Image (spheres, rainbow, N blue to C red):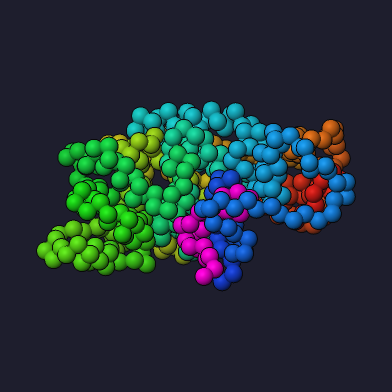
Amino acid sequence: MPWAPQPGESVQTDFGTATVIRTAGNDALVSLESSGGMEVRIAVSKLQPTSPPVVSIPTLPALKNPLPLDGLPESGEGERQALEALRFGLVPISYLDRLTLNYELLRDWIDGVLSGVAARKPAISTIVGPYGSGKSHTMATVRAIAGSRGYATAHVEVDGTQISLSEPARLLHALWQTVLLAEERSSTPLLDLHRKALASGHYRLRDETFPLAAVGKNHVELEGLLGMKPEAASLFPMRIEKVLEGDTTISPTEVNRAIRAEFGWRFSTFTLRAIIPPRRVERPFAFARALLDYAELARLAGYAGLVVTIDEFEVEWVNLTPVAQQQVVNSLAGLAGQLASKLSAPLWVCIATVPEAARLNVATWLRDVCGGLAYEIAEMHPHERRELARRIHTLYCNAYNLDESFDDQEAAAVERYLDAHGANDSGRIRAFIKRYVATLDSAYGPGPA
């Protein structure tokens, strides 16, 4: 029977290791580990299971100026893998420090926020910049640095329709699909957090000062279940995980019934609870509490905490009805209220948006309520893109053992090409990277696959 990728499965792509989010026909939506969780659609035929490991060797067309591949120094292997991502406009995590302009400034800001988060003081901040300024790249850098500091990280991109703060359950479910536990991916990250916390002797999420919410109650239930029947974690891993994620396509009642039936517990009160309740009025509190409690759970499981990034916030105001927009405000108000309360947790929520969203005062209000943590990005100018080109050129020469000087006119020609072909602001940087690497391929090395 031919292999078919499954949601949550780790696979190998031409761009490195990825995790399958979902499949549709002959295509699969995957999250690339080497690019900060960037989601791309790839043909199933291009995927390979990671176990046993499969080395994918792309077939390259004839080169304009063929490079001697034999005898290339091993030190160039990382650069060549990075270029595979750059050919698609993606910056791999391992090269963020070298390909991010003003990296030191951004790193210092991130570490400044994390210093408070490490003291279990939850934070929320905004990353604000015009279209095409690199907000998504900045968010990926936030997650990469946080992950290297021992934090669990997760990200989501709202679209104002299927994924929106107006529907917290769907948003949380999408968010938890991207979890990295200190840079390691798992198909059941939330269940793993519960199990690791329990293994460390933490049987209660919070002390009696605060009443338990859904995450804390589920932790108590899992302590009883896994204490008596540890095999439940291997018999029902994905069903338990979906309940913990808040997946609305699965009924907690049905999962509870299946677990009780498996172990013959006719009179058991074992009950995993939905993370987000059905009553709309309760959802903002439940959404905020879930983020805080999972951050605290991550700490008890041995991680530094939880860092969450929410991108494309501005589209909420384009695609939503006024009623749904108010529900977004309610979710944010619930989050701000909980973060300003005495409920401690090592949580950082980072929201990216454009300056135009400030006219609604929502992002600004949210930032001000929670301490004014903001990182502003200016529009990237042509001379800055040329500096980026210079760094890519250095990487390219290292990858293929070339001794070539940087030609500013090649980068300028890419700018003129994008101007002539109407590259939009939001995709300008990615288009520039792709076109510039293609220019280097044409001049020195492998052309596009």
Q: Residue placed farthest to the left in the image?
A: 267
Q: Above or below — where is 310 with respect to 109?
A: below
Which residue is located at x 81 percent, y 56 percent? 61
Of residues 52 and 117, the one nearer the viewer is 52
Return the x and y of residue 358 as percentages of the image width and height.
Answer: 52, 47
Q: Is residue 24 left or right of residue 173?
A: right
Q: Above or below — where is 105 with respect to 219?
A: above
Return the x and y of residue 189 as percentages of the image width and height.
Answer: 39, 49
Which residue is located at x 79 percent, y 35 percent? 401
Q: Is residue 18 magenta?
A: yes
Q: Residue 236's quadrant in the figure?
A: bottom left
Q: Residue 278's quadrant in the figure?
A: bottom left
Q: Is residue 319 magenta?
A: no
Residue 328 seen = no
Of residues 257 and 248, the one nearer the viewer is 257
Q: Is residue 328 left or right of residue 423?
A: left
Span colored in magenta: 1-23
Q: Residue 29's quadrant in the figure?
A: bottom right
Q: Is residue 412 left or right of residue 100?
A: right
Return the x and y of residue 10 as percentages of the image width and height.
Answer: 50, 54
Which residue is located at x 45 percent, y 39 percent? 182
Return the x and y of residue 2 as percentages of the image width and height.
Answer: 54, 68
